[in-house]
Image (cartoon, coloured by chain):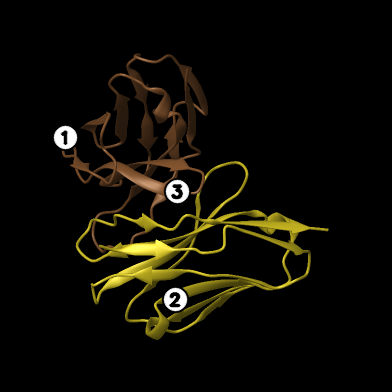
Amino acid sequence: AQKVTQAQTEISVVEKEDVTLDCVYETRDTTYYLFWYKQPPSGELVFLIRRNSFDEQNEISGRYSWNFQKSTSSFNFTITASQVVDSAVYFCALSEAGTASKLTFGTGTRLQVTL
Amino acid sequence: DVKVTQSSRYLVKRTGEKVFLECVQDMDHENMFWYRQDPGLGLRLIYFSYDVKMKEKGDIPEGYSVSREKKERFSLILESASTNQTSMYLCASSLMGQDDQPQHFGDGTRLSIL
């Protein structure tokens, strides 16, 4: 069975610091998809990125970047020059092929960015 | 723009009541999902549906049932509410097809069972 581990329960940083959120996954499938979602205090989960298992290219979007490494089964998320608006709970999730997009979520990492 | 609407943000019910949580999406998505979110446990899948009148159990279906009579609406039912069902409930939808389709979430319903 698949599993997603986010070992960092809570991270606190000062604005402008860089921060990396870790995500380690387990799956027996060779075809799978990885996602990151952000949950701000308002409660709604916001989709940030998806990656398929055949594409190990890292991705950068503004201050956000993602590092996918199959060799270590990790899909880490880095925020550069963090801002107060980045404060949220971040979830990593996994979907296996043929599962109708069913997601297995990690337990989430709460990021607190202070001035 | 994509929209998933849950009928209530906050709900308070009593033990033993039958509780209905409603979710509507306007994106013509085939797949719909119900999760509950608890501190330290992340999101856990209760039920999902990939078509009208179709439903499949998720990881924690006990004490819940669902109904999907129309494509846009997916209801979660607590047959006889208990205090351990106090939680945040999140509805989501996604397109059928490739399993890389992201799920789109509603704002959540914070349910308290007294």
Q: Do the residues at discs 3 and 2 belong to one chain?
A: no
Residue at the spot 72% in from the left edge and 66% down from the top edge: A82
Q: Secondary structure at mark 3?
A: loop
Q: Which residue is mark 2?
A: A74
Whichever of labels 3 and 1 marks the residue nearer the N terminus, that label is: 3
> Does any portion of residue A25 appear in the rendered image?
yes
Q: Position of residue A55 (x, y in %)?
A: 37, 81
Name the residue that disc number 3 marks. Answer: B41
Give the colour in which the image draws chain A. yellow
Q: Which residue is mark 1?
A: B53
Judged from the image, the secondary structure of the residue bearing numbered disc 1 is loop
Chain identity of mark 1:
B
Residue type, numbered disc 1? Lys
User: Residue sitting at 45 percent across and 29 percent down?
Assistant: B86
- Image x and y of residue B45, in percent: 33, 45
As drawn, the chain in brown is B
Q: Nearer the viewer, residue A17 or B29?
A: A17
Question: Which mark, residue A35?
Answer: none
Foreground residue, B64 or A51? B64
Image quarter of residue A41: top right
Residue at image coords 79%, 64%: A14
Name which residue lies at 60% across and 49% down.
Answer: A40
Within 10 Å of the Cα at label 2, are there few (<14), some (14-19), or many (20+) other Cα atoms? Answer: some
Corner quadrant of residue B97: bottom left
Q: CA distance from mark 3 to mark 1?
A: 29 Å
Q: Amino acid at mark 3?
A: Leu
Compared with residue B40, is residue B106 higher up or lower down, i.e. above or below? above
Rounded to the nearest angstrom, the CA distance separating label 3 from label 2 is: 20 Å
Residue B84: percent from the left, percent from the top? Answer: 40, 29
Q: Residues within 10 Å of mark 1 (few under 14, many from 20)?
A: few
